[in-house]
Image (cartoon, coloured by chain):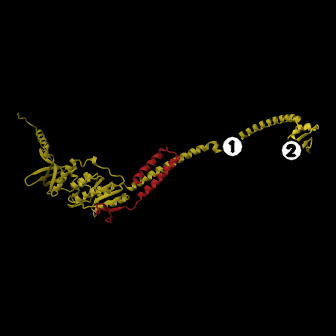
Chain colours: A red, B yellow
Amino acid sequence: MNFEQSLKRLDEIVTQLERGDAPLDESLALFEEGTALIKSCGKMLDTVEQKVVMLRKGENGEPEESPFEGVE
Amino acid sequence: MEKRIFSVSEINNYIKNLLDSDVLLDGVFIRGELSNYKVYPSGHHYFTMKDADGAIRCVMFKSSANRLRFRPESGMKVIVFGRVTVYPRDGAYQLYVNELQLDGVGDLYIAFEQLKAKLEAEGLFDSRHKKSIPEYPDTIAVVTSPAGAAVRDIIRVLGRRWPMSKIVLLPVRVQGSEAPGEIAAALDYANRYKVADLIITGRGGGSIEDLWAFNDEFVARAIFASEIPVISAVGHEPDVTIADFVADLRAATPSNAAELAVPDRYELWDMLHALEARLFGNLSSRLSLYRHRLEAYSEKRVLKDPVNLIADRKVALDSIQERLTGAMRASVAEFRREYVERAAKLDAMSPLKVLARGYAIAENESGRVIRSKNDVKSGDKIRIRVQKDTIGCTVD
């Protein structure tokens, strides 16, 4: 799941829990899923290094990536 | 036709209506030299434009004057765009100026206005064609010069706000005669190979000639044709190019484009923490609800004092036992009486009583009573039972 999907699922979980109509064991499963999502979203937000590449047309026309060093 | 007499304002209004209904005078470019240039405290600009043989009075209202990118002075050669109409109070016609550009760039300015009008008429600027910008783009294509300030600004801001997205730079020239073709080709290429889910194209600030590639029709049509949403980011805040009108979103500067392209991860941290708080808050309130319910149960006597319950049950059990024992005793007594009675009857009929009177019973070896001579044969061992003993015999 990417960030957007994770955040959407997390929102669903919290909303469902707040409705309070799920039985306790189901709620606990949702809670566990929610904490896992928070963890993975937090990990994504913690990304330090951004990938920056230069894209040029290769010999057969397909895109070819090379590292971009142009930023000091 | 009868000659009638008009008032001054009637004739002024008549002339005004004549001029206002003229198509040419409604929007006209005029080249000339500024003279007697004055800025009034109201913010409106008053001046005269002249050439070798004539002059025309001009006014530029504050709203238009605010868009000026330089301070006009008397003596400057300029091209203006505006409409000619009558100012009835003075009985003088004058030019209401909307745009004022230095001459020399005048041709570019006219070309800009003409292309803008053409593409607008074709619907390229319609809001219904604007694609929405993805909220969390995975890959962002940047179509600009790899050497300019723009690419540095974009990478710096994207890195600060949203380093999770990948940046793909498609290097192009952004000024000179080759620039428009390269920019348009890079936009097409990015779409053909779907290299990103968002495109930023633009450049840093410069003169109107420097920015001209982004007023090119090819670039405008490539932006319009792009399936991938495009953010334009050309020059500084007041610079407006054709690319800005066609793009799905116009950014004031390249840094601003990066801000519009991605969310701020620190805001998302806050959002995530809020969701976390709701998640935990919900569970703990749920648990405390259960705890209360549990406590309510434990208030009941059964759970609070189990010994008591056992005592109760014990009493009940005792009384049942009591009744059971009583009933049993009674029936045992009854049984015993009956037994004695029957035993007496039985005793009277007992063969042992007969033996006591001197009779004997003959049995074979298996204990069967011998009732006739045929029950035995010679040599059989038999027993004779008398009152107290048994006597072994052999049949002759």
Q: Which mark is residue B127?
A: none
Locate the C terminus of chain B by quadrant. top right
Looking at the rendered structure, the kind of residue marked 1 is Ile
Which residue sits at x=71%, y=39%?
B316
User: Residue B352, how many percent across, how many down?
Assistant: 90, 38
From the viewer's perspective, tell me whether residue A26 is left or right of residue A7.
Answer: right
Which residue sits at x=87%, y=39%?
B374
Q: Which circle's residue, 1 or 2, is located before the other in the chain?
A: 1
Rendered position, B165 above or below B342: below
Q: Badge 2 sits on which subunit?
A: B
User: Residue A45, how many percent across, how many down?
Assistant: 41, 57
Q: Can residue B235 be seen?
A: no
Looking at the rendered structure, the kind of residue marked 2 is Glu
From the viewer's perspective, tell me whether residue B391 is left or right of residue B127.
Answer: right
Which residue is labeled 2 in the image?
A: B365
**Element type at mark 1:** helix
Q: Badge 1 sits on which subunit?
A: B
From the viewer's perspective, tell me whether residue B333 is left or right of residue B191.
Answer: right
Q: Quadrant of residue B261?
A: bottom left
Which residue is labeled 1 in the image?
A: B310
